[in-house]
Image (spheres, helix red, strand yellow):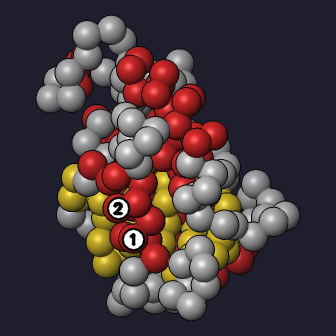
Amino acid sequence: MGSWMLCQCRRVAPCLVAIALTVAPGVAADDSTAAWAALVQDGHVALIRHGNAPPGYGDPPGFTIDDCQTQRNLDERGRAQARALGEAFRNHGVRVDRILSSPWCRCLDTAHLMAVGPVEKSWALVPDREPTAPVRLLELKEMVSAWRGPGTLVLVTHGFTVQALLGLLPNQGEMVVLKPEPGSSAGVDLVGRIAAPH
């Protein structure tokens, strides 16, 4: 994300507590057994922070969304993480019904390198610029809570997007597995977290 986005995100995240999804307390940083078991069932959501892209936050001054060379991009480790995530999906028998990505190149590259299906762009996976008008977050919350399958919805996004939604900041390449719960106030339960591939 850009330097303006980094600045905005730091101000946005604390302001969004009231509308952020409530998550189950005490979920470990790598609860992969429950998470993978859920993903082989229909109707779950895999929320993935893009693979490793040094130095970790923001983009160079003057970057443009249409030119990957001006952005912070995946390094070889990040590309390997993305390929390993896709391989793990196949090895576990996860059926991907739809995969959406933030328009940023590091997210798109992660999604494409996973090779689990055609990749669509979505601005709902980019942090909001204005903390008083969290339009993207509300769209993302609706997208996640309304998912019914038949397979898994994969969303490749940014750390600050996950933080605004769930109140936790995943590592690069980490996956958070969610189960939509239409009857609950949050609309979703946090099933587990799967650490980034090494």
Give the amino acid type for the residue marked by disc 2 in the picture. Glu
Which quarter of the rendering shows the C terminus?
top right
How busy is the neighbourhood of tag 1: few (under 14 within 10 Å), some, or many (20 plus)?
Answer: few
Q: Is residue 65 visible?
A: yes
Q: Is residue 147 left or right of residue 9?
A: left
Residue at the front extreme, as displayed: 132
The answer to whether any part of residue 36 appears in the image is no
Q: Residue at x 75, y 70 (%)?
A: 24
Q: Quadrant of the N terminus?
A: top left
As drawn, 56 above or below 119: above
Q: Position of residue 177 (x, y in %)?
A: 58, 68
Q: Is residue 57 left or right of residue 5?
A: right
> For mark 1, what is the residue?
142
Residue on which the image places disc 2: 139
Task: Depth check: give the residue in front, 88 or 155.
Answer: 155
Quick check: 9 left or right of 27?
Answer: left
Residue furthest to the right in view is: 26
Tell me what residue is drawn at x 55 percent, y 30 percent: 11
Whether label 1 touches label 2, CB < 8 Å: yes
